[in-house]
Image (cartoon, grey):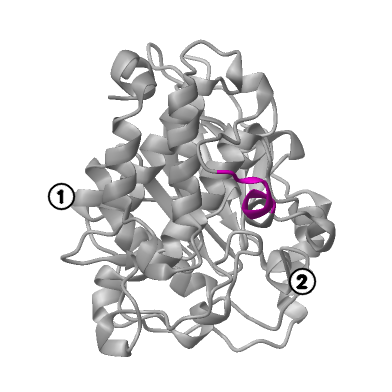
Amino acid sequence: MEVKSRKPFFFNKALLEHREQVLQRQRPAPPCVLPVEKSLPSIGSRKPFLYSMEELADMTDNFSEKNLIGETLFTKLYRGTIRQDWLPFEDWVVTVKIWDYTLQSDMAGFRSSCYLNTNESLKEEVMSLTQPSAKQHPNVVNLLGYCDRRYLEAVVYDLNPLDTVHNLATTGSLTWLQRIKVALGFARALEFLHDPKKPYLVRNINAAHIILDQDCNPKIFDFSTMSGGILGKLTHLKGKLLTVGYDDPESFPLGGPEEGGFEVTYHDVFSYGVVLLGLITKRIVDKENILKTNLVYRWAWRQYRPNCYLVHESLVEDPGFYASDGIMITELAMRCIQRELDKRPTMKDVVKHLEGLQAVQLYGNVVGM
């Protein structure tokens, strides 16, 4: 049988230059040994796959711009393909996320001296995603494997991506019912993370950090500022990192009651409210021009009137839209961004209200009921 030869592997020039810049930086090296509780766990009887640098480049066509989906505070997200050489197996579409050091110095348009330990962040994410409960949740990404080469930390998700909510919210790509589906699915993901037994504080909720699969199911995939649960207390470094435009403007201590702070819901619920407003109003935070952006929640505070909705006029004509739903979902979003912390709903309350929408009751098969 003729053996198919493989093309030689070369990194593109931009990536080589980027890695050389990283090597020149005077930064403290990541710790050589992680605490025992942060070692990479197994999933049942197997561990996540360990991918090489060459395999990641092969999946993403050498990290081609055409496969770039978007950016988070610290990472870049690519469409990828695991090619199958043996029939009858088809190529496997995945999502590849790499930590990018250049993003750390210019987060959301602001210069920052904060340095995220990417090796630590990678291991925390793998540890979180390999928990049985996370692996079973339909709105949390499913981890296939990771790469922990120095200066190329990455994870691979079993996800055929459509796009991020940030890229789709302002366009006509999502119908009203699809937007309800995204809002409900993401609320369920946060309800899961806010489990009273071991609650997590996400703090990194952002339309750019929610990705949709081909059926418009939302997936939470960015965990770089998460604390609580099995990860432990909020660190000083994570406490300084903000998601501009989605971060709660009200100042209050973060963490659990033992730290003199509030429970996790208050901060994350506000950010969820901003995402929800973006979905229904087609307004989104412009991270490229953040200083001139009319922040969504400030605009909503000025525009909101009781018993009225803030739904974009183009969505009002969509099948499945009801004026009563528009009013209910607007009031829910406004409750999420309330200045009075104790008046904000929990994510459990948010899920309950969304499930009560007329559109959800009549089109449950469409919106994910």
Answer whether residue 92 is visible to the viewer in this image. Answer: no
Q: Which residues are magenta?
A: 299-305
Q: Could you give the CA–CA distance between mark 1 and mark 2, rounded to whole angstroms?
A: 42 Å
Rendered view: 158 above or below 121? above
| Residue 7 horizontal/vertical position (percent) | 67, 33
Residue shown at 37%/11% (left/top)?
88
Q: Amino acid at mark 1?
A: Gly
Q: On screen, 304 above or below 298?
A: above
Q: Is residue 169 above or below residue 253?
A: above
- At 58% from the left and 44% from the top, the residue drawn is 305
| Front position in the image: 43 or 309 | 309
List the residue tagged with mark 2.
Answer: 110
Task: Considering the whole magenta stretch, tell me its main secondary structure.
Answer: helix
Crowding around mark 2 (Cα neighbors within 10 Å: few <14, some 14 to 19, many 20+) is few
Identify the residue position indicated by label 1 in the image: 44
Q: Position of residue 80 (x, y in %)?
A: 56, 35
Q: At label 2, which amino acid type do we have?
A: Phe
> If the image is split into quadrants, where does the C terminus sit?
top left
